[in-house]
Image (tube, rainbow, N blue to C red):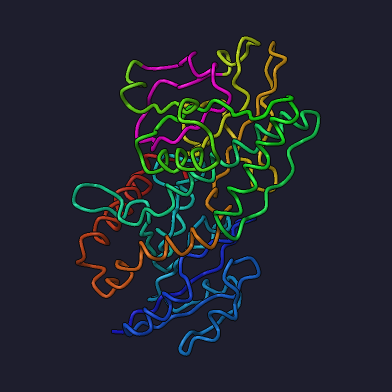
Amino acid sequence: MVVHLWLRSEPKANERRSALSPEKCKDLLSAGFKVTVECSRDRVFKDEEYARISGVDMVPEGSWVDAPKEAFILGIKELAKSLTPIPHTHIYFAHAYNNQNGWAEVLNRFIKGGGRILDVEYMTDEYDRRVAAAFPPLAGFAGMAVGISAWCHQQTSPQITMPAMKPYSHESLLIEDLKMQLQGAAKTKGLHECYPRVIIIGALGRCGKGAIDLAQKAGIPSSCIAKWDMKETQPGGPFEEILQYDIFVNCINLMKKIPPFMTRKVLDTDQRKLSVVVDVSCDVTNPNNPLPFCDSVTSLHQPCRTLQLSNSTKPLDIVAIDNLPSLLPRESSIQFADSIMPYLLKLPEVKTHPVWVRAGRKFDEKAAEVLNHQVKC
């Protein structure tokens, strides 16, 4: 049987990434797949890049709802909100397995329609390690970039809201821009050079390593970069030490409830240097969020929101962007497509291949919670 893979457009605002590059479409066609691509005005790859490939069927944006039932629908971020039942199997980051806001409603659409989710986040090997994990390093990388940019803006234009950040076509352009912003911050202070002190929690993970990589490439000295992981957080927070850094970047992969790293009460003091918090994990609707004051998302269009505190007069900007890799959409799309491609090629064995079986089992477990009325839908 020919496997039909349908690349959908992304309804999320400011999302330019694609789960499948034109080059990978060629590989799928060569392997005997049927490939359908939805048109998209926002995708980093132009429609023409797909359309010129012999064998790719181009269809209108959002038309996956009328796709053949057997088609696998491939995407990245969440679907547009709806109650319409879904009969297809979707491969994407659903963010619906950790009691996030609206998670049961998402699953109910698939349960009622007879469809399934093969969540990319739960595509794992026998050691429970993610196999399609290209985005975490780039999320940390981009999160640190936005954090540094926000700090520089505080130094140079403290009375003005930070403007939108536009995607960069290449990493080198982002690094060059950040170095110029750091020079501008130093000039404002009358210094030859000036760097923020940053602290990364989750520094040993993929996301944390991406954040460290960006900080180093931007020229921040190693002496200004604190790297915390499980050893440092084991005693349990909140950690007042964080207040002595300029930028705090949260890069943990939240799996269970832990004491908060920081609270609004601890932040509410003028005896802090901390002025930017970057929540790369961005699990803002998760009841176990270790940054409970990060309860709403920001965006590349509006990168920061100011946290309102009762007593402190010092500014504190929150960055909580849930699609950070979109800051480098082409690079992140290519890397992701490269990482997921070996498993897409195994879709003919979706019922027996271990990675797909594990992803399907996770959906079945969460769907059972809905069906057993453990949550109210």
| Residue 42 in the image: above or below residue 327 | below
Quarter holding residue 32: bottom left
| Residue 185 in the image: above or below residue 268 | below
Relative to 158, is 30 on the left or the right? left
Percent of width and height locating residue 118: 35, 59
Instruction: Report the residue at 66% width, 11% height from top.
Output: 270
**Which quarter shows the N terminus?**
bottom left
Instruction: Report the residue at 47% width, 28% height from top.
Output: 225
Relative to 355, is 44 on the left or the right? right
Asked if one can make out residue 29 in the rendered structure from this viewpoint, the answer is: yes
Percent of width and height locating residue 285: 51, 37
Q: Nearer the viewer, residue 266 or 203?
A: 203
Percent of width and height locating residue 111: 40, 58
Instruction: Report the residue at 44% width, 76% height from top.
Output: 23
Quarter holding residue 210: top left
Q: Residue furthest front?
A: 192
Quarter holding residue 272: top right
Instruction: Report the residue at 54% width, 25% height from top.
Output: 197
Q: Nearer the viewer, residue 358 or 194?
A: 194
What main secondary structure does the magenta stretch of the protein show? loop
Asked if one can make out residue 282 in the rendered structure from this viewpoint, the answer is: no
| Residue 72 in the image: above or below residue 324 | below
Query: In this picture, which residue range is highlighted in magenta?
Result: 236-263
Percent of width and height locating residue 174: 60, 50
